[in-house]
Image (cartoon, rainbow, N blue to C red):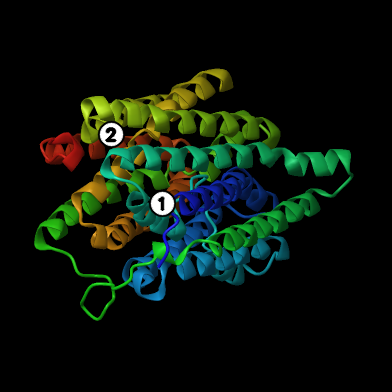
């Protein structure tokens, strides 16, 4: 089987960029669109949670079956399903049908790509380079995800443009955007179709060739990491782009166009931070880089609700975003380093599954707390959960080093 690691890496990065463009777009417009069609804060949270729950189920399939069914085929099929979520929104079906279609289409309202495809990409990318380049390749992959997300956020002004420049009705302008999102999903599927067969596992390990074999030591490490990542994701579920954009919209009356610019800046800062994370990790280690950047970002976030004006709130939010994603490539690289190559699909799938499940739980709880407790509850509770995660992660893993840090 002929290997084309460079071409495969280019295709995976390009697909990730386009997929993230769609996610960044949804992160800004989804909550506001659902508000315009008359849904309550609780129901908006429920719709976002349904999409994340669908993504969680897909990640289960990826974790246990992708190596058997083929990584390339799995990525292609997931991208086709993603188009369903975009088609569901402009059809304005009943709530039950909308939740079903959003679930099947794995519609992501977080503003950040944490899909089953994302989990599978993480299992593939570390195998396309030696250990010395693993963190850097994952950093560049995440840079492109955030570039895509920033362009998607910028495109959130498209409904405004269609409505005021081309005389579309408000809802019609949104419908055009959602159909475009489905087109992006189909384009991503086409890119994955050109991956080489070499990215697949030739002989998935026992039992039953399902790719679920894992050593006791890896199992112990994975269980502890999964528990910690679940706590982090629970906090993140309170802080999806869709809910944060909705918070700015209701708190300060900021429209989609200005919010699109804010989240464009957010994703640019996220993108730059990934390269900073790879540079920092080469000097102070993966775990230290994860904790010492993530902790202050949560403190910045918890200060946002106390800002006296939109400008101060945005400044604090951007300070948070300049740091919050520095744990992403380092975390991915750390997980890949601590397990064997044949265990990476399972490890990536399980850790991302836990994150998606607890994102969904957090998103549903956020909408309820916004409506019943205080409108700023998600920012405070989400930030507090993430602070706790950082402290526990440092306590548990500060002495466990990846191979490149023990040489």
Question: Which residue is under mark 2?
Answer: 290
Mark 2: which secondary structure? helix
- Vertical relation: 158 (above or below) 39: above
The residue drawn where x is 25% and y is 44% is: 334
Mark 1: which secondary structure? helix
Question: Could you tell whether 137 is left or right of 36 in the image?
Answer: left
- Label 2, label 1: how far apart the Cα atoms are: 26 Å
Q: Nearer the viewer, residue 304 or 200?
A: 200
Residue 345 position, x and y percent, is: 32, 61
Residue 280 position, x and y percent, is: 30, 26
Q: Nearer the viewer, residue 40 or 127?
A: 127
Question: Could you tell whether 200 is left or right of 42 in the image?
Answer: left
Residue 114 position, x and y percent, is: 44, 51
Question: Which residue is under mark 1?
Answer: 365
The residue drawn where x is 41% and y is 51% is: 365
Dot 2, crowdedness within 10 Å: few (<14), some or many (≥20)? many
Q: Residue furthest front?
A: 2
């Amino acid at each position: 089987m002929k290997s084309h690691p460079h071409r495969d890496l280019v295709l995976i990065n390009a697909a990730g960029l386009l997929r993230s463009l769609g996610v960044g777009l949804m992160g800004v417009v989804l909550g506001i669109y659902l508000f315009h069609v008359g849904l309550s804060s609780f129901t908006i949270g429920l719709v976002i949670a349904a999409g994340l729950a669908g993504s969680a189920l897909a990640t289960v399939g990826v974790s246990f079956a992708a190596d058997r069914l083929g990584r390339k085929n799995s990525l292609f099929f997931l991208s086709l399903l993603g188009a369903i979520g975009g088609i569901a929104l402009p059809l304005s079906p009943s709530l039950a049908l909308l939740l079903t279609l959003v679930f099947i289409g794995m519609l992501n309202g977080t503003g950040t790509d944490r899909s089953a495809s994302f989990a599978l990409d993480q299992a593939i990318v570390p195998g396309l380079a030696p250990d010395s380049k693993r963190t850097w390749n994952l950093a560049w992959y995440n840079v492109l995800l955030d570039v895509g997300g920033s362009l998607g956020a910028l495109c959130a002004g498209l409904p405004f443009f269609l409505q005021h420049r081309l005389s579309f009705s408000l809802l019609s302008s949104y419908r055009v955007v959602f159909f475009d999102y489905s087109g992006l999903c189909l384009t991503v599927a086409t890119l994955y179709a050109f991956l080489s067969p070499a990215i697949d596992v030739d002989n998935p390990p026992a039992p039953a060739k399902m790719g679920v074999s894992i050593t006791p030591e890896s199992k112990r490490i994975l269980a502890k990491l999964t528990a910690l990542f679940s706590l982090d994701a629970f906090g993140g579920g309170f802080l999806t782009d869709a809910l944060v954009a909705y918070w700015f919209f209701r708190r300060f009356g900021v429209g989609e166009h200005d919010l699109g610019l804010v989240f464009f800046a957010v994703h640019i800062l996220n993108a730059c931070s990934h390269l900073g994370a790879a540079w920092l990790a080469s000097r102070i280690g993966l775990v230290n880089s994860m904790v010492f950047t993530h902790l202050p970002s949560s403190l910045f976030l918890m200060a946002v609700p106390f800002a006296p004006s939109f400008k101060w709130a945005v400044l604090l939010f951007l300070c948070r975003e300049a740091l919050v994603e520095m744990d992403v490539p380092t975390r991915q690289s750390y997980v890949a380093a601590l397990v064997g190559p044949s265990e990476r699909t399972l490890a990536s799938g399980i850790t991302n599954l836990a994150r998606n499940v607890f994102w969904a739980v957090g998103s549903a709880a956020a909408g309820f707390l916004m409506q019943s407790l205080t409108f700023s509850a998600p920012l405070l509770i989400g930030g507090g959960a993430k602070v706790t995660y950082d402290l526990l992660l440092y306590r548990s893993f500060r002495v466990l080093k990846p191979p490149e840090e023990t040489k």
